[in-house]
Image: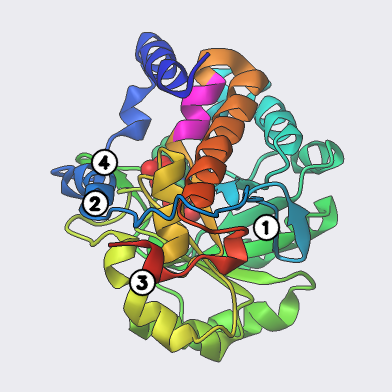
Amino acid sequence: MKLSEIYAKGAENLRKKKLLFYLQGVETEFVLEHNEEIFKRFKFLQKAIGSKPASTETTLLGVNLQTPITMSSVSMPIPQIAEDGLIQVAQGVREAGSMMWTGSPLPKNLDELVRTGVPLVQTIKPYEERGRIFQEIETAERAGVTAVGVEVDAGQGTKIRDQIMASGCTPISVGELREIKEAVKRPLVLKGVLSPWDAEKSLEVGADLIVVSNHGAHTIDSLPHPLEVMDEIVKVIDGRIPIMVDGGFRRGTDVLKGLAFGAQAVGIVRPILYGLAANGKEGVREVLEQMTSELRRTMTMVGIRSPAEVKKDILL
Ligand SMILES: Cc1cc2nc3c(=O)[nH]c(=O)nc-3n(C[C@H](O)[C@H](O)[C@H](O)COP(=O)(O)O)c2cc1C
């Protein structure tokens, strides 16, 4: 199946299973709509003559990957799409040479997912009951995850349309994040940074990677797209830690725009859910491989050999 067919079939199957709601956006859906429109603002400067075939291989959190396109955090509603959906996603992501990210609820079979051989990052919400954060970190580390993360943008939980989804969360402080950093044995990721302010705080905490994200339009309304705040964030981070970005990336060209703005990796969730709903683990693998193939073709035609070489000057 071609990428556009996977997306269409995935959406159709999610509709039949009455699961499309989970892909909707908070309140007015302003953020959701904007997340996909933003990519139309940017175009590439082609360098056709003398360009050489590009490679998409990269390293993230110390892991060698075939692609800078990774999954971003999601658990719910994968088991509703397919009972063994999390295992299928793990296998599809591993076969594509990418990285799996799970969110809440913490998968019960996290160790089984890790045993598939997929590098896995588990992110955790800032639960009011702080003890739960430490418990989940311990469970994740015992399962053998590559890194753990805190979803700093879920300080008021999550919301889809008018429905509160995750509740029982409250904003987390630099002091608390520092305690977490001291307690974890793996790299610490902070997900949901969307301002130079939070980027600065992430450095203070000693984060090992930040994800610039508006949580796929599941937190508060009227947030910007990550690419609108990337320049300022990149300035603050100044190459000290890697930056991942997510939100609305659907094609390889979108991914290259994310890299051009200074991200080392780009996360996707809805495309993974479409892939799973359309064709199980093969669908997940196909989505990652086809987006990566689009990325590779485009990199080649703008004169870029590897993700590390990408700079803003490939954009008009
Ligand atoms: C159904 C669904 C569940 C999600 N669950 C989580 C989660 O548990 N934790 C988290 O940090 N982000 C979660 N997200 C947000 C994603 O990690 C990611 O930031 C966003 O969806 C990326 O945008 P995209 O779906 O347009 O690719 C979820 C998103 C969706 C659509």
Cα separation, mark 4 vs mark 1, equals 27 Å
> Which comes sooner in the sequence, label 4 or label 3?
4
Crowd around label 1: few <14 · some 14–19 · many ≥20 (10 Å): some
Query: What's the mark number on residue 25?
Result: 4
Label for residue 136? 1
Foreground disc of the pair 3, 1: 3
Could you say where residue 89 lies in the image, as x and y percent from the top left? 65, 30
Q: Amino acid at mark 4?
A: Gly
User: Which residue in the structure is indicated by mark 3?
Assistant: 230
Q: Main secondary structure of the magenta part?
A: helix
Q: CA distance from mark 2 to mark 1?
A: 35 Å
Callout 2 environment at 10 Å: few (<14), some (14 to 19), or many (20+)?
A: some
Contact between labelled residues 2 and 3, with CB atoms less than 8 Å apart: no
**Which mark is first along the chain, 2 or 3?**
2
State the separation of the CA atoms marked 3 and 2. Answer: 13 Å
Type of residue at label 1?
Glu
Q: Is residue 202 above or below residue 64?
A: below
Q: From the image, which quarter does the C terminus lie in?
A: bottom left
Total labels drawn: 4
For the residue marked with disc 3, what is the amino acid? Met
Describe the element under mark 2 as helix, strand or loop: helix
Residue in the image at 77% along x and 66% along y:
62
SS label for mark 1: helix
Is label 4 or label 1 in front?
Answer: 4
Q: Please, is residue 261 above or below residue 304 in the view?
A: below
Q: Nearer the viewer, residue 134 or 214?
A: 214
Asked if residue 272 lies in the magenta stretch, the reply is yes
When asked about the image quadrant of residue 12, the answer is top left
